[in-house]
Image: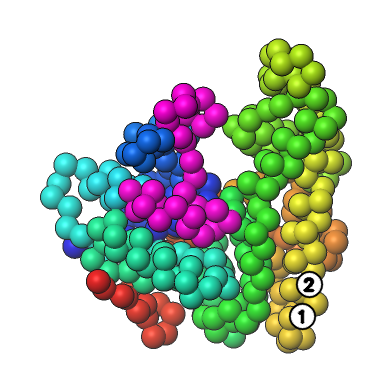
Amino acid sequence: MKSIGIDLGTANTLVYVKGRGVALREPSVVAVEAKNRRVVAVGNEAKLMLGKTPGSIVAMRPLKDGVIAEFDITAAMLRHYFKKISGNTLFSRPKVIICIPYGVTEVERRAVEDVTLEAGAQSVALIEEPIAAAIGSGLRVDDARGCMIVDIGGGTTEVAVLSLGGIVLSKSLRIAGDELDEAIIGYIKRKHNILIGDVTAELLKKRIGSVHPAADRGAMTIQGRNLLNGLPATIAVSSAEIREAMSDQIEHIVESIRTTLENTPPELASDIYDTGIMLCGGGSMLAGLPLLLSRITGIRVVVAKAPIDSVAIGLGRIIESEGRLGGGVRYRTR
C-alpha cells in the first residue's frame, strides 16, 4: 500500500508519493460530456480544451475557492490521478494525506474526506494547508520561535503564524490567482473593449504581471475578440496595465497580511521580525511582491525555493517521517 500526499488545489493538483517525491503536477481541470457528464479528459489534456470545447463537451474546474464544488467530477479526477501514478503495476488503494484551507467548515472537511475515499483511497487524513506549506518551505514549525507563511494559490490565500507545530493565528482569503485572472479579463474588457479568455489572462499575469513599478516587465501582444464588431483583434498590453488591473485584489491580500501581523502576540511578532515572512504558492512568483510586502510591513520577505511545490513537499516530509507533528496524523477509513 502506497502512502501519498495530495495538494488538491483550485488551479493545480500535486501528488507526492512516498519514496518517489512529487510524482504528479497537473491542472485541476476536467472535461466532461454535457449530456451524461462522462469524463473525456483530465489535467493537462483538459486544460488545453478550456474555452475551446464544442457545445457537447464542458471543460471545468471542479474546485472553487479551495473547496469542492463538483463532488463526482473531483472524485473522477482523483481516480484518474491515482491510476496515473501507479504506472502499470497493480495499485493497492493508497493511504492519503490531503490538504485543506484553514478555517473550512465541517461540511467542507467531510466533503474532502468523502471524495478521496470515493476515488479509491483506503484511508484519508486532513492537514491544514498553512502547516504543510510552512514545512515544505523549510520553516521549523515545531520550534517555540514563531514564523509566518503566506501561501497564494489559485483559489485561496492562506496567511498564518505558526509556533510549536500548530497554527496560532490564520486568515484564509478567497482571493488568489483565479481572482487575479478575472480582474485582468475585466480590465482588458473595460479599457480596450477586447474580450480575452482565462488562459490568455493567466499568461499575461505570469509573463508581465507585476505588483511594483520597479518590477515592471515591458509589454506583451495578445489576441482577443473585439466587443464592438465581434472580430478577432490584436493589442499590446503593458506590465503597468496588468499591475493596475490586479491592484484591488493585491490590496486585499496585503491587508490580510497586515491584519494578521497586527493581531499576532508581541513575542511571536518579535520572532517574525527576526525570521521574516515566507511566501509560497504560484502567486508568490508575481514580480515585485516581496519588495512590495517588505516595504509595507518593514519585514524581510523571502520566496520559498520551490514555491509551487511547497505544500506537496511539506506533505511528503510528514509522510516520510510518519511521526511528525507530535501526535501524528489521524486517518479516517470507509
Comparing 276 with 50, the one in front is 50
Residue range (magenta): 48-76
Q: Which residue is mark 1?
A: 263
Badge 1 amino acid: Asn
Badge 2 amino acid: Thr
Comparing 173 with 269, the one in front is 173
Q: Which residue is mark 2?
A: 259
What residue is at 15 percent from the left and 46 percent from the top? 89
**On the rendered structure, is 193 left or right of 305?**
right
Q: Position of residue 14 (x, y in %)?
A: 42, 51
Q: Which mark is residue 293?
A: none
What residue is at 36 percent from the left and 71 percent from the top? 125
Q: How many numbered dots are placed on residues in this image?
A: 2
- The quadrant in which residue 255 appears is bottom right
Q: Which part of the image, by quadrant, shows the C terminus?
A: bottom left
Comparing 30 with 219, the one in front is 30
Q: Position of residue 198 (x, y in %)?
A: 62, 35
Query: Does the CB distance between marks 1 and 2 fall below 8 Å?
Result: yes
The answer to whether any part of residue 25 appears in the image is yes
